[in-house]
Image: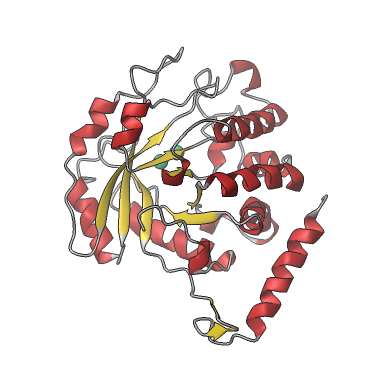
């Protein structure tokens, strides 16, 4: 694999740094390495998202989870597509749907923010406008939502792994060239299986095969832009599904992102109350596997 050596060398050098820091919360030469604290969940669906449609997934239930789990900030990120944004195959409801959750209740220790998961269609158009953007406190964009045939991906690309890999990279790149409020935006579930979603005879291997087709150099170019533009990278992976070599295949993009100086945030992507517990497990696994510190954290809310 090209250019894997510099990334590994970087990580090894970093490990050596910590050999001298048995208690990683102590200071070395004036520097402080605080472990990444799981106190944010920036990807949660309420009952208003059609993929939830769960009467128990209310904003009050979401806030109660946030308080119990010790979250400092949580964000409700329902799907929508603003009716003012032209797209040939509209799929989601408009902004008026997700606004029904306002005003959001606030907790004693947990701040509850109004956000969204804004989709990107097959022409790299994203379904929000400037007016929505001003009202939204956080916007996540799932560049890998390639499970919607003819909406987010052209039918001629749908059943071809290589074409999907090209779409993934092209969408990622196009997104980064746009004039958006990136400091309050994140890239949702970057390595999720949806990049291979809906394919004929789909297998677990497919999404990893697509990720493998994106070279280290290409990821590096993309993540350098992510870092420069100030977006967050979401950690939201069903970690129990990845062992051994597959785990490393899934982690590779995140490791490159980290080496490029990208900042990370955690998201459960819970659609139902039961999703919070597994979400927390996933967050802990990813933070541990990537050996993240507080300085690696994306903090759009201060
Ligand atoms: Zn999604
Ligand atoms: Zn989601």
**Residue 138 placement, left or right of 223:** left
Q: Could you tell me residue 129's position as x and y percent?
A: 37, 25
**Residue 195 placement, left or right of 93:** right
Most foreground residue, 240 or 23? 23
Q: Could you tell me residue 108's position as x and y percent?
A: 18, 63
Q: Name the residue at 81% across, 60% down.
A: 5
Most foreground residue, 19 or 64? 19
Quick check: 42 above or below 297?
Answer: above
Q: For ligand 1, which image quadrant applies?
A: top left
Most foreground residue, 140 or 301? 301
Q: Could you tell me residue 75's position as x and y percent?
A: 32, 48
| Display coloring | secondary structure
Is residue 166 shown to the viewer in this render?
yes
Going by the picture, which residue comes out furthest to the top? 88
**Residue 201 placement, left or right of 126:** right
Res. 68 image quadrant: bottom left
Q: Name the residue at 67% across, 54% down.
A: 256
Q: How many marks?
A: 0
Is residue 79 shown to the viewer in this render?
no
Q: Name the residue at 65% across, 42% down.
A: 222
Q: Could you tell me residue 291's position as x and y percent?
A: 57, 68
Pick the quarter of the image with the C terminus. bottom left
Q: Name the residue at 63% across, 47% down.
A: 223
Quick check: 37 above or below 185?
Answer: below
Quick check: 41 above or below 56?
Answer: below
């Amino acid at each position: 694999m090209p250019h894997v050596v510099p990334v590994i060398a970087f990580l090894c050098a970093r490990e050596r740094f910590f050999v001298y820091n048995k208690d990683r919360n102590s200071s070395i030469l004036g520097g402080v390495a605080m472990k990444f604290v799981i106190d944010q969940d920036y990807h949660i669906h309420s009952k208003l998202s059609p993929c939830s449609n769960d009467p128990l997934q209310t904003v009050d239930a979401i806030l109660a989870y946030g308080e119990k789990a010790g979250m400092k900030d949580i964000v409700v990120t329902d799907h929508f597509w603003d009716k003012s944004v032209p797209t040939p195959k509209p799929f989601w409801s408009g902004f008026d749907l997700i606004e029904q959750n306002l005003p959001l209740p606030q907790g004693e220790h947990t701040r509850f923010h109004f956000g969204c998961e804004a989709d990107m269609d097959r022409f790299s158009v994203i379904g929000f406008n400037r007016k929505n953007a001003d009202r939204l406190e956080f916007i996540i964009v799932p560049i890998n939502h390639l499970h919607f045939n003819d909406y987010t991906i052209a039918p001629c690309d749908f059943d071809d792994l290589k074409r999907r890999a090209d779409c993934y990279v092209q969408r990622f790149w196009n997104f980064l060239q746009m004039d958006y409020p990136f400091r309050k935006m994140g890239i949702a579930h970057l390595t999720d299986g949806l990049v291979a979603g809906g394919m004929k005879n789909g297998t677990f291997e497919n999404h990893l095969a697509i990720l493998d087709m994106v070279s280290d150099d290409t990821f590096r170019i993309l993540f350098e832009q992510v870092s420069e533009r100030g977006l967050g990278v979401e950690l939201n992976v069903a970690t129990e599904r990845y062992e051994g070599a597959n785990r490393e295949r899934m982690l590779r993009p995140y490791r490159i992102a980290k080496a490029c100086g990208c900042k990370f945030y955690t998201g459960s992507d819970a659609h139902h109350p039961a999703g919070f517990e597994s979400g927390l497990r996933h967050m802990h696994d990813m933070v541990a596997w990537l050996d993240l510190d507080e300085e690696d954290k994306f903090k759009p809310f201060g």
